Each structure stands twice: as structure tokens, then as C-alpha cells.
Amino acid sequence: MSKFGNTLFFENPPVIASFASVCGSKEKQGAIGAFADVALDDDMYGESTYEKAECKMLTKAISVAIEKGGFEERDIDVLISGDLLNQIISAGFAARDYPFPFLGVYSACSTMSESIMLAAMMASSGHISRAIAATGSHFASAERQYRYPLELGCTRPPQSQWTVTGAGATLISSAGDGVKITCATMGRVCDYGVTDVNNMGAAMAPVSAIITP
Amino acid sequence: MTGKTSENYNVNYLRYVKTQDPPTKHFKNCLAAFGVGGLICCIGQFIRYLLEYAGLSGDELAGSTSVILIFLGCLLTGFGVYDRIGRYAGAGSIVPITGFANSVTSPAIEFKTEGWIYGMAAKMFTVAGAIIVFGVCSGVIVGIIYYFL
């Protein structure tokens, strides 16, 4: 493994052996709905709370990713996962159902890319042979965590963005067929002083422009 | 180049972000707020006339009207209707007393999943707490001024 700037280059590029995604009802109506493995009509996913639904979506994504790749749970060496809630509870509770170890990560919207990068580093260095990088979020639980209760009659400004209801999992293997991960760039924190809680995109965009490759 | 040390960079970027935001339709919003807010007030006045007809007067009349409006606000929040009205009406449904009822009821419903005591009861005033604190404080200050006048 070599490093140039903030970018890591993998000498033995790991591959994405399998992947799976679960999406909510609003996402199902959009363009990505047709590509999701599981598209839900019910955002509660048959659970009593949004947090439980988020956890269940994450569990489903992980299970489908393992199944689609033709693997079994004992083939997986580690799960790297995170979500948006306090103490990354969704990921923690999802990991409870599996026999493999769990590494929790939190980096808000870049949780997925961070977990993929960490999994790729571990697979490339030869410490593990297969890892799952997964993350999940739920609009309703994120709204409650960061903004206002859903039933509060407040207006959303036109530029406001929605947190996705869904979960995704990728199975990263040190060998095999699939898309190769050849390099990964570590991001830095970049604060341009956007204070609008509804405009998440504007707060996150600058880092992609000034990022050092 | 990031953070609060480079004020100029931030100002330029924030100005750019503002130009990219879709414009808020102020005229339409004002009209909707005026219509819905006015309608809520009309309903309030209607209830007041009814109670007056039933024989109430003075503080009793004003109190009962507010209580009925608060109840209706809570009920509509529970049915999941009030947030839809709010999305359309904006300030029209936030400013009247029903909006205050909504701001207390909505966190109560939302946090019920965390338990009755630590969830519902403790988090009930997350939105309305600020209004209550500053309302009480300004009430005390005005009261003191009034006492010395």
C-alpha cells in the first residue's frame, strides 16, 4: 500500500464481491427505486418505531449482500458499519444478529465511503479475506435526531434536503471477481460556515472541491 | 482555507449558496398564512360567540375559548393533520394558540417511543420550552415595571 497526498493506493486491490440495498417508499417512487434489492412500501417495515425499522433495513441489506454473493455468515471476517443515530445504535443492534466481529464508524453522510475504505484497507493488507461495509439511515429517525418532530407544523424551505430512508451493504473480498477498489482518498473536515440545518448539501459540497487527491 | 479563520472565503461561498437556493414564494406564503390564520381566528371567534350564547362572560369566556382551541390543535396534531396545514399555511398556523399546542404535542407523540417518563414527559417541551422560558421571563420583567409605574 502506498500513499500519495491523502489518497491510498492498494497494491493488492480488493474487489466488491457482492452488494445489496434496501430503500423506503419515497425512494421507491424515484429513479433509484427500480435498482434496490428490497423496496419498501411501508416506511415502518412492520416495526413499532422508526429506529427499529432502520435497524431492520440494515440487517436486511447485510443478509441479502451475503446471500447474493453466494457466501455464508461464517465466511465474513468483519462488519464495518455505522448510522446517524446516537451511539450508532442501528448498526450496533444489527451487528447483534451476526456471528462476526463489528467495527462501528461514524462520519455522517460519508459513513458508507469510510467503511468501504477501511474494509478495503484491511482486505488489501491481508489481515482479513472478506468484510462487509454497510450503513443505513431513516428520514423519520434522522429528522427527530437533528431537526424537528415530524408532526410539528413547520415549513420546510425550498432548498431543504431529505435524509434517505434506506440501507446499503457491500461485501469486500481480498480476491475474486468484481469491481476492483484501487485507491481511496481520505477526506478532511471543511467548514465554510453554513448554518442552515435544512441545507445539508451546501454544508458538505466545499470539501469535494478543495479535497487534496 | 477552511473554518472561521478565513472570513472572506466563507462570505463568498455563503453568498454563492444563497444565489443557488430556489426562491421562497413570499406573496403566495403570505396569502396562505393570512387565509389560514384568519380562518383559525374566525373559528375562535365563532366558539367565543357560542360560549357567550351559553352564558359565559369575562375571564371564563376567554379562558374556555383558548382551552377549546388548544384542544383542537392537539387533536389535529394527533390525527397527523396539523403538520399538513402547517406545511401549507406556515406562520398562519404557527402564530395562533393552536400552533403552540402543536409544538407541545408533536414532540410528545414523537418521543413516546423512548418511554413515558424519559421520553414523552421529559422531551415534551423541547420545542415549546424556549417560548415558555422567555414568555415567563418577559412576563416577570413587565410585571416589575408595571409595579413601579
Image (cartoon, coloured by chain):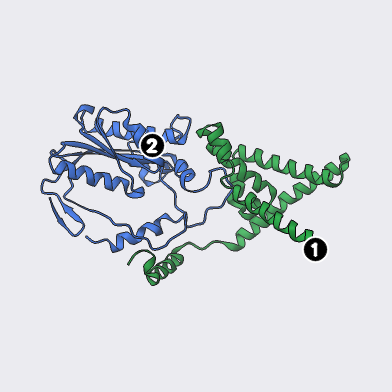
Chain colours: A blue, B green
Say whether residue A4 is left or right of residue A133: left
Position of the C terminus of chain B by quadrant:
bottom right
Mark 2: which secondary structure? helix
Give the structural element (helix, strand or loop) at label 1: loop
Foreground residue among A146 and B29: A146
Residue sitting at 35 percent across and 39 percent down? A167
Q: Position of residue A134 (x, y in %)?
A: 30, 39
- The residue at which mark 1 appears reads as B149
Q: Which amino acid, by three-letter code, is at mark 2?
A: Ile
Q: In the drawing, does residue A73 fall left or right of residue B51?
A: left
Q: Residue at x 86, y 47 (%)?
A: B58
Q: Residue furthest bottom?
A: B8
Labelled disc at residue A68: none
**Residue toward you, A36 or A147:** A147
Name the chain letter of the residue that bears numbered label 1: B
Q: Position of residue B119 (x, y in %)?
A: 53, 36
Viewer can see residue B120: yes
Q: Whole-percent x and y of residue B22?
A: 48, 62
Q: Is residue B81 visible?
A: no
Going 72% across and 43% down the picture, which residue do you hit?
B69
Q: Residue furthest left?
A: A11
